[in-house]
Amino acid sequence: MEQICVVTTVVDARGVADVLAAAAVAGRLAACAQVGGQVDSTYWWQSAIQTTAEWSVQFKTAPDRVTALVDQLRANHPYEVPEILVIRVESGNPDYAAWVHEHTRP
């Protein structure tokens, strides 16, 4: 199986999540992006505990596209310090992994 990666982030508006998802797929930085429903996040920010409604976005991509995807997310993310996590998938459907690789080629 060709290796794939899942890149995740969260944003404070559904519309922002949709824009990030569409831009990554259109630019072939991700084969697909999934916008998850609203979640409530609690975290430290500026010396206080904050709670905010956020939307999650998961991007499926090839390892050689991760750096460009992370760079694009950082450049277009509305947060000062965005959560951007990269997870390498150890195993899965090899046909899906091949599809991800095929659709992340410029």
Image: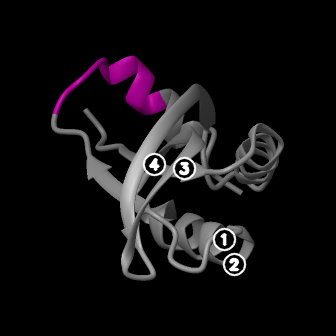
| For the residues bearing labels 3 and 2, Cβ distance under 8 angstroms | no
Instruction: Report which residue position mark 1 lands on.
Output: 72
Labelled disc at residue 10: 3
| For the residues bearing labels 3 and 4, Cβ distance under 8 angstroms | yes
Callout 3 secondary element: strand
| Badge 2: residue crowd in 10 Å (few <14, some 14–19, many ≥20) | few
Residue 9 appears at what percent x and percent y?
50, 52
The amino acid on which the numbered mark 2 sits, given as a three-letter code, is Ala
The amino acid on which the numbered mark 1 sits, given as a three-letter code, is Gln
Above-or-below relation of 34 to 26 = above
Q: Measure the alpha-carbon separation of dots 3 and 1.
A: 14 Å
Who's the residue at 44% across and 51% down the image? 7
Q: How many marks?
A: 4
Q: Which residues are magenta?
A: 91-98
Of the residues under marks 3 and 2, which one precedes in the sequence?
Answer: 3
| Badge 1: residue crowd in 10 Å (few <14, some 14–19, many ≥20) | some
